[in-house]
Amino acid sequence: GQPVKLEFINPDATPHNLVIVKPGTGDAVGLAATRMAADPELAKSGQYIPKTDAVLFHTKMVPPIAGETLRFLAPKTPGAYPYICTFPGHWTIMKGVMVVK
């Protein structure tokens, strides 16, 4: 895979992250993150990032008016790799797709 450098900037008033997952797993990972919110200590320690092999790459939970650089090698397998924000409730609308050719 090719090297990727992603500059994630959070201009919002709430924390956000960027979680890139395996094709077809965005909803499952989002639901798992939502379930984490039922246990606040678990959620804080995991940064709302479920421990699953569906998660390929992720930023930390980025606080308001901050940013993080994420570097990784793109998957070698072509496809549509969903990305979501796993802060509780965000994954249903804060999502997109990274296309690997």
Image: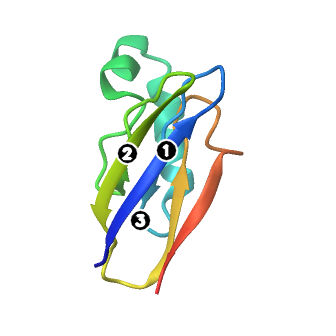
Placement of 42 over or under 76, stated as above or below: above
Placement of 4 over or under 83, stated as above or below: below
Q: Residue furthest right?
A: 93
Camera-side residue of 95 and 23: 95
Question: Residue 91 in the image: x percent, y percent?
Answer: 61, 43
Mark 3 or 1, which is nearer the eye? 1
- In the rendered structure, which amino acid carries the disc numbered 1? Phe
Instruction: Specify the quadrant of the image occupied by residue 20.
Output: bottom left
At 28% from the left edge and 55% from the top edge, which residue is drawn?
53
For label 3, the SS is loop
For label 1, the SS is strand
Query: Which residue carries the number 1 mark?
Result: 8
At 30% from the left edge and 82% from the top edge, which residue is drawn?
76
Placement of 75 over or under 4, stated as above or below: below
Query: Which residue carries the number 2 mark?
Result: 69
- In the rendered structure, which amino acid carries the disc numbered 2? Thr
